[in-house]
Every structure is written in structure tokens, then in C-alpha cells.
Image (cartoon, grey):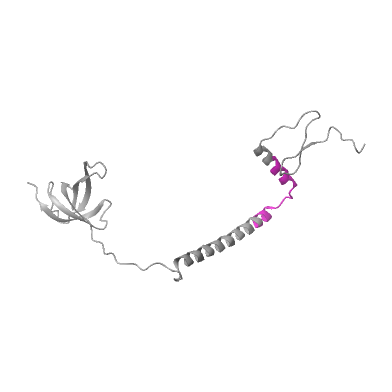
Amino acid sequence: MADETPQDEPNVTEREGSEAHATETPAGESAPKLSGKEERARRDHLAASRRPSRTPQERDAERREKRAKKAVARSRRREQEKAKRVAARGDSPARTGTPPASPKNTTPQVRTGTVVSAKPDKTITVRIDIARRHRKYEKIVRSTTRLHAHDETNDAGEGDIVRVSESRPLSRNKRWKLEEVLERAK
């Protein structure tokens, strides 16, 4: 009797590189073919059922331990990369802190344009016409830009040609101020 295998026992199938898995099939039927994804899910489910159950505190402690190990590995890796950068740069000491602030030596931009509107108090709208040659096609391309400029004395009127210069933000739209009126409208 010991040598005989009964027909009701589970059918055992083996795959390359994996352990033997038991699939229960009735006598005379072959085991259903599972896709790789289904097979992995089944294998994971079996492994989870064999694992002893843990409390949430144990799972949390394990997760924290893994995170701590990863943090140590990250900091070790960063130190290695830092040492590599210092070696590549030469034997100059590592820079620390923020670099010293350099004074701004920039001059404000200046534009020349025509006043389109002088209705708001202490504000003018200037239209700047730009004509430049296209780099590739060499056609002259014209474009216009409208900007708002600060006119403290309400000196400029519609149609005047004015020079405006860049300034700090004076309002939501005003970043320019009137320098001088070049030509009055007729």
C-alpha cells in the first residue's frame, strides 16, 4: 500500500528555478496553465499564508529599521560622491556657506517709443515698434510691445515720442519710468 499513490492526491508541477507547487485537480484532469503574473500572485499568497502573523507594531518596527539602514547607506553614498568631487576639482578646500554677494553693476535698459495713452494719472502706455531681420529667412519682421511707464509730472501726452528706462516694480504692471520726452505730438 505504501508504494501506491492514490488518485485524489494533489498534482505536483515544477518550474525552472522555483520550488514545487501543489495544484489540486480532480482525477483525470490536467492542471490549468497560469500566466506568469498569476503564478507569482499565487506563489506570494502561499508564502504569505506560511508566514507567521505580526502585530502592527512589529511591522512598523521592521519598516523603521529598513528606513534607518537606507538612510545610513544614502549618507555614505553622498560622502563618497562629495569626496570624488573634491578629488576631481583638485586639492582645493570644500566651499561652505553661501557665496559672497556681488554688487550689481548693471545699467537699466532704455527704450524709445510712442505714447499710446496718457489717460491714467502718473502713468503712460508706450508702444515700442521693433523691426529686425529674421536670422534664417532674412525677412524683416516687425513687432510691437506695449508697456506702462511712470510719469510723475504727467508731462507726456498721446502721440509723443519718449524715452523710458527700466525701474523697480512700481505697481502690478509698471516696471518702467519716463526719462524724457524726445518729440512732442503736433
Front one among 118 and 19: 19
Majority SS type along the magenta span: helix
Residue at 59% of width from left, 62% of height from top? Answer: 72
Q: Is residue 117 visible?
A: no
Front one among 22 and 50: 22
Toward the right, the furthest residue is 1
Residue at 56% of width from left, 63% of height from top? Answer: 76
Residue 23 x, y percent position in the rendering: 76, 36
123 sits to left or right of 96: left
Q: Is residue 88 visible?
A: yes
Say if the magenta span includes residue 52: yes
Q: Quadrant of the N terminus?
A: top right
Say if the magenta span includes residue 109: no
Q: Please provide the residue range marked out in magenta.
A: 42-61
92 sits to left or right of 35: left
Q: Quadrant of residue 69?
A: bottom right
Residue at 15% of width from left, 48% of height from top? Answer: 114
Please tell me whether residue 157 is drawn above or below residue 8 in the rendered image: below
Residue at 63% of width from left, 57% of height from top? Answer: 66
Residue 154 x, y percent position in the rendering: 14, 53
Q: What number of labels is visible?
A: 0
4 sits to left or right of 90: right
Toward the left, the furthest residue is 186
Residue 121 x, y percent position in the rendering: 18, 51
Residue 82 x, y percent position in the rendering: 50, 64
